[in-house]
Image (spheres, rainbow, N blue to C red):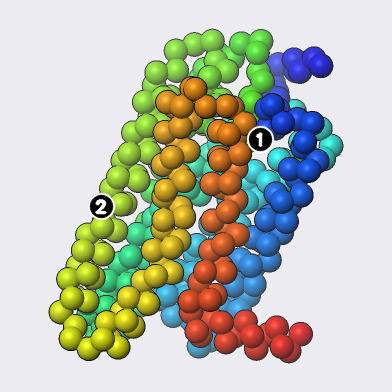
Amino acid sequence: MNLTPSDPSTFILTGISGLESAHEWISIPFCISYIISLLGNFMLLFIVGKEPTLHKPMHLLFCMLALTDISTCNSFMPKALCIFWFNLKDITVGGCLTQTFFLHMNSIMQSATLVIMAFDRYVAICCPLRYTTILTNGRIAKLGLVGFLRAVLLSLPMPLLLSRLPFCANRIIPTTFCENIAVAKMSCGDITVNRTYGLVIVFLVIGSDLMLIALSYGLIIRAILRISSKKAHQKAINTCTAHISVMLMYYTPGLFSNLMHRFGQGIAPYIHIILSNLYLLVPPMLNPIIYGVKSKELRDKVGKYTCRS
């Protein structure tokens, strides 16, 4: 099958290389996960927006994470499903670079949101009497804006650097979406700057954010150890479990996927691709479920609207 694009202004996304014959079957769990992600996150946004009692910093952070999750899913899943179902593998260079920008911007924004959530948990446990004065809705909005601007400024150079590269006749990208290094590898030119910038962003953003989260949890653990009451002990721990679950679900596969993409040449290509897709799809699907289960206020409101329906 000839996969060479007839138009020099397009790339070809092959889908999951090595498993092309199973694309229709693979699309079923992908589509179900996509629908669950959209329903869960839109429901969370609707309920928090509808209920004035939920207009609190913690629930605003849930909404921030939900918006990022929706944007992440919509950045790559529609195109992936078009590949699986209709064999529509062509993507314009402009569309590919736009997808690269949004995927990396959403990833950096999600990391920033998790840092703000860690700070929220620190204030709630270590300074409970000052929580309402330190973390106001306006301050959460400002922190979210700073995180968004950081995500845009750090992601923008990636498509700009890619747009300067000369691309060869081989414009086949063996995956379901346009990732920075995957697109750079299609170039005939020197991609050292692209590789270096990609690694710097991974270690600078993830490294600095993980340090801030570790600092917050170090102070939280110290405060918990000083609590004598077992009931208060358990309550303090419970307030952090949802955030820890989401954090591990995001950072662990993210770091593994990035490092494997660059250094895991001995691993089968379809393993790379499937893990990259799961890294982008699973957290948006599970995040609203985790927070819905752990937040009693949110769980009660979901029950209220579900029963009414």
Residue tagged 2: 211
- On the image, the x and y values in percent for residue 285 come to 60, 59
Q: Residue at x 75, y 30 (%)?
A: 20
The image shows residue 204, relative to residue 209, as above or below, that is above
Q: Is residue 100 left or right of residue 197?
A: right
Q: Residue at x 22, y 69 (%)?
A: 221
> SS of the residue at dot 2?
helix
Amino acid at the residue labelled 1: Thr
Residue tagged 1: 176
Q: Classify 10 Å Cα crowding around label 2: few (below 14), some (14-19), many (20 and above).
A: few
Mark 2 and mark 1: span between their CA atoms?
32 Å
- On the image, the x and y values in percent for residue 3 come to 76, 18
Q: Residue at x 49, y 11 (%)?
A: 189
Amino acid at the residue labelled 2: Met
Q: Which mark is residue 237?
A: none
Instruction: Classify the position of the N terminus by image quarter.
Output: top right
- On the image, the x and y values in percent for residue 263 come to 42, 26
